[in-house]
Amino acid sequence: MTKQHANWSPYDNNGGTCVAIAGADYCVIAADTRMSTGYNILTRDYSKICKLADKCLMASSGFQADVRALQKQLSARHLIYQHQHNKQMSCPAMAQLLSNTLYYKRFFPYYAFNVLGGLDTEGKGCVYTYDAVGSYERVGYSAQGSGATLITPFLDNQLKSPSPLLLPAKDAVTPLTEDEAVDLVKVVFASATERDIYTVSSCVYRVL
Amino acid sequence: MFRNQYDTDVTTWSPAGRLFQVEYAMEAVKQGSAAIGLRSKTHVVLACVNKANSELSSHQKKIFKVDDHIGVAIAGLTADGRVLSRYMRSECINYSFTYESPLPVGRLVVQLADKAQVCTQRSWKRPFGVGLLVGGLDESGAHLYYNCPSGNYFEYQAFAIGSRSQAAKTYLERKFESFMGSSRDDLIKDALFAIKETLQGEKLKSSICTVAVLGVGEPFHILDQETVQQLINEHEIVEEEAPAEQEAAAAADQDAPPADEAPPADQGAAPMDI
């Protein structure tokens, strides 16, 4: 008797792509605005970016219902933090919180592929990239979502990021100026749109 | 005051139908340092006297932000107040999370009152020893409530609790009719004057009081020391010269202080003129 498979899935993939690039004193976070299901478009105008704290934004692709739930969770936790510590959460702190929140649901995960971007405690740009269960890493740039496989090699080429295996550890932050980084992001989305049906060139971006 | 027979625990009634433990809890509120609140149609101001135990120690925190649209000032056992503030914050966050909208103040005070009532009907608990002045803004406007350790709550135009609050209440009773239409700045001014009343002669400085404001388009926040000191200076000077602005709000020729009289003594005399 073969194993019976579920005739229903609690997850759905709403598509979309998210990108973030960290600079010396800025951070660019961008996400496209299409929300789809299967081969259909649900809306052309949906923001996947959420401002979690003063200096911290999160862009998430994947299952938007889970993404929204995750955003609300983190915002509520941030409020509690503010009440207790009388200050905003720093980006590295939020990064750890996001990781813990994701792992908390290790056995029924949030179907969310996140990119956290912001300014760290020294004011330098920082980008953290995640998988669905909370494994994370600080990087100089990252792309997640349906267009990630198209975008990441291009960013690797343009941003010439040093290998994380190098010793001594080289700073991954890009030497580009803020305007150059924003232009790069726009170009990147335009390219991804050419070949990825789930990504459109219309994108929302925030710079910190 | 010979009520020792029926006051051992909160679940014992006295023959006169009173719960003495609850009344003792309300006494604790009266012993705390003063806190006052007043509201207009669009703003609520909370202010309190912050006395530190000694010059070396820091002040007791008596005003808490509960949410952007709700703040609370406490008098009495401040530790109880802290715990209740934490409860209120948590309720606001949960409501916001579920309904994506701010918790209406009226709902919050009822929840608080119910929580207080529980402690008046369990033999293994004691009533909260803190009075809370809850100021908040919701769709129906600005509100000020007072929550008692007994589990009662009332809505007020203006109120004062804690030690020497009667002086402040007298001042507020004179002025309250004008509060509904007051501007934000007038409301703060009146709050500072009310606080001064409770000090009874001591000089009003920003280091011994805390003022917090919330209103339409203005999330709850505590004013910083410099701003408060500035306002104190502004109004102290105004008060000595010509109380023309005050007369606009209060009954005519009630407070016409001679310019050389010290402000505290003047304020003390004015109520007795009525």
Image: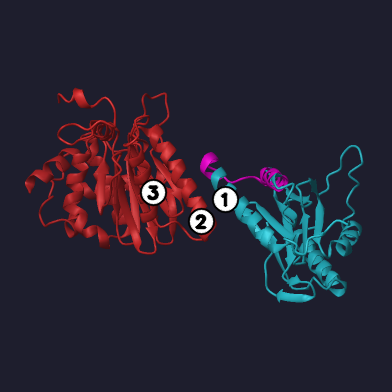
Chain colours: A cyan, B red
Asked which secondary structure carries label 1, the reply is helix
Image quadrant of residue A62?
bottom right
Q: Residue at x 14, y 34 (%)?
A: B16
The three-letter code of the residue at mark 2 reads Ser
Which chain does tag 1 point to? A
Image quadrant of residue A202?
bottom right
Q: Residue at x 81, y 55 (%)?
A: A142
Circle 1/circle 3 CB separation < 8 Å:
no
The three-letter code of the residue at mark 1 reads Ala
User: In the rendered structure, does residue A194 fall within the stretch colored magenta?
Assistant: no
Residue assigned mark 2: B96
Asked which secondary structure carries label 2, the reply is helix
Asked which secondary structure carries label 3, the reply is helix
Residue assigned mark 3: B111
Bounds of the magenta segment: A82-103
Whichever of callouts 2 and 3 sits on the residue coming sooner in the sequence is 2
Q: How many marks?
A: 3
Q: Main secondary structure of the magenta part?
A: helix
